[in-house]
Amino acid sequence: MKLNNIVRKGGFTLIELMLVVVIMAILAGVAITLYHSYLKTAFEIDPVNTLLAVSAAQESYYADNGKYASRIEMLPGFNDGTSDGNFVLHDDKDDRRKFYLSVNCNNDCNESYVATVENKPGDSKWKVKWNLSCGVNTTYGNCKPVQVKGSSTLRNVF
């Protein structure tokens, strides 16, 4: 019996199958990395947008009362029914997505305020904290969110 007379039936060799598995693993690795980056960016957009909304609410409060609000509950739309000085942005079971918003000011709130939004996760790599410092003498273009803690793709946006 001659070996070179063996007819090869249709199908894939082991090498071809292994090559496909390796290519799929590389694509999955790239996709997971991109998804993680996208998830973290989406996770950090809400605090920034909320700080910008607080800025607008504070300016409206100042126009009506001649001073800035000393507590977050004094601003329209930011009263969650508690008087603890914090507004819970997302009441989520996951502490990474549960953000606390607060407002602090000096000199009876006549001149400036600092709005802070932060989460309190168990894992420090998910810690995010943004501040917004504005006041009477702050020009509109200089009143912008600044990231204090956390690594972010949004850090260089503002």
Image: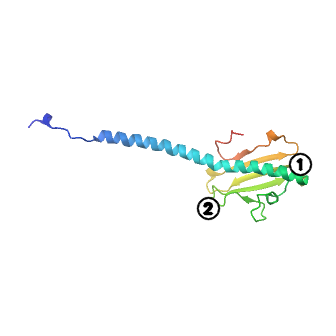
Q: Badge 2: few (under 14), some or many (20 or more) residues near its Cα, within 10 Å?
A: few
Residue with the mark numbered 2: 93
Residue under the image location 54 percent in, 43 percent down: 34
Viewer can see residue 106: no
The image quadrant where one finds the C terminus is: top right
Residue with the mark numbered 1: 111
Relative placement, left or right, of 134 versus 90 is right
Q: Are marks 1 and 2 in contact (CB under 8 Å)?
A: no
Residue under the image location 80 percent in, 60 percent down: 73
Residue under the image location 34 percent in, 41 percent down: 18
Identify residue type, mark 2.
Answer: Lys
Where disc 1 sits, the SS reads loop
Identify residue type, mark 1.
Answer: Glu
78 vs 112, nearest the viewer: 78
The image quadrant where one finds the N terminus is: top left
Residue 48 pos. (x, y %): 71, 47
Is 125 located above or below residue 156 in the figure?
below
Task: Choose top left, top right, bottom left or bottom right for residue 147.
Answer: top right
